[in-house]
Amino acid sequence: MRKFRLFIKETDKLLLLICLATSIFGVIMVYSATRYTLSEGQSIPRDVITMIASLCIGVVIALVMSLIDYDYYFKLWPVIAIGCIGLMIITFIWGVAPPARPDAKTWINLGFFYFQPSELLKIGFIITMSAHLNFVKDNLASFKTVLLLGIHALIPIGIVMITHDDGSALVFILIFLSLLFIAGVHWIYFAVGFSAVAVAFPVLWVLGDKFIFKQYQKNRFLAIIYPDLYAQNEAYQQTLALNAIGSGKIFGQGLFKGSYTQAGTIPESENDMILSVVGEELGFLGIALLVILLILIISRIIIVGKKARNYTAFIACCGMAAMIAGQAIINIGMCIRLLPVIGITLPFFSAGGSSNLCIYIGIGLILSIYRHSVERAPIDFRVRSIATPFTR
């Protein structure tokens, strides 16, 4: 019982409870988004079952991970890197794709579960980059150091881009830039990098299919500026999502009562467009609650990082916070047509076993940092009534 009480005491209960509350909110909204798919005799949609299962397994993994000193995770960074990249390489051979994106073979069919290794690679990248930054923290002014950090980041970015998972590639870039900024890399490197992108962007845009931008990707950018011209194609999903969110107004149409949602009108409403379900059925207040919960999670992770006992753990917490914040900003921007549709899930809310499972693996790392940074009360080792030859 003493060990159990100590386990409870040293667990970051606040972070875990906020994450669970957010996930439950997400499960309810995914259930609402997929109710129309229920067949006779079926009470729970498959997406909801997968989400609940991944949530339960993820929480157990997170708690087990919290018992292991986080220093071991950083010491094992080569094993973690090889394992994550190995899983990505498997997708080149046995990867499967959803019907809507036959070119994106980013899932591995495990029979009972479709696993997306890029989600696990994000957590692995946070660990390896944190270890790398800790190793070179005294030489961040060196061009060679920054170059090697860039090569480190290009490995996962390149791999996921080969699988046509542009959304994950963008998340890796945001994590990388956030960690460089937090680590204190000189601003001149950022200025040079952004200038290079500004120069290369129009060239790559013009060259089109020969390099990065395919025509459908260009159209997604153009659909933001000229939605009417792409109303039946690239802008179709975003237009419906915007209409659904707008129809919710302040208080929403009511849970399970959204006209767009319950008719299954919006493609991927349970996944990339889950915000449209929240906005339509719970209104502005529902979206405000969603944003507040995510901000609380991000803030708590940063607080844990500030109290961590070493630099590596602090950087890892910042990386995890950057991942959640980056995905949330991109997804929300995508749903309200401020950003192009790029296939990014909303953390804790979107359907998907891989994303929900892996985000709790990341939370497990944060719980470990919290647990092993707690200052334990000193144990009283005083012993009385011992007879010695020197006793009078």
Image (cartoon, rainbow, N blue to C red):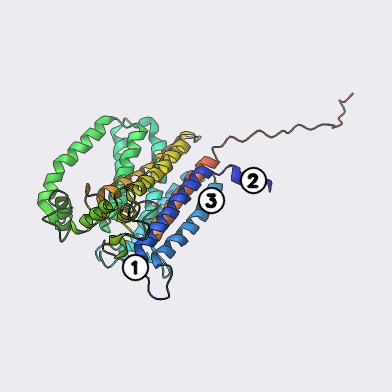
Residue occupying image coordinates x 18% and y 39%: 196
Q: Are marks 1 and 2 in contact (CB under 8 Å)?
A: no
Q: Amino acid at mark 1?
A: Tyr
Mark 1 or mark 2, whichever is nearer to me:
1
Residue occupying image coordinates x 35% and y 38%: 179
For label 1, count other residues whose C-alpha is less than 10 Å away and answer few (under 14), some (14-19) or many (20+): few
Q: Are marks 2 and 3 in contact (CB under 8 Å)?
A: no
Which residue is situated farthest in the top direction here?
A: 392
Q: Earlier in the sequence, mark 2 or mark 3?
A: 2
Q: Is residue 360 visible?
A: yes
Mark 2 or mark 3, whichever is nearer to me:
2
Which mark is on residue 36? 1
Residue occupying image coordinates x 41% and y 70%: 111
Left or right: 382 as drawn, with respect to 283: right
Residue 187 drawn above or below residue 337? above
Label 3 belongs to which residue? Answer: 63
Q: Earlier in the sequence, mark 3 or mark 1?
A: 1
Mark 1–mark 2 Cα distance, whole angstroms, equals 45 Å
Q: Earlier in the sequence, mark 1 or mark 2?
A: 2
For label 3, count other residues whose C-alpha is less than 10 Å away and answer few (under 14), some (14-19) or many (20+): many
Which mark is on residue 5? 2
Q: Amino acid at mark 3?
A: Leu
Residue 4 locus on image (x, y percent): 64, 48
Mark 3–mark 1 Cα distance, whole angstroms, equals 35 Å
For mark 3, give the secondary structure: helix
Q: Is residue 129 visible?
A: no
Depth check: give the residue in front, 3 or 288.
Answer: 288
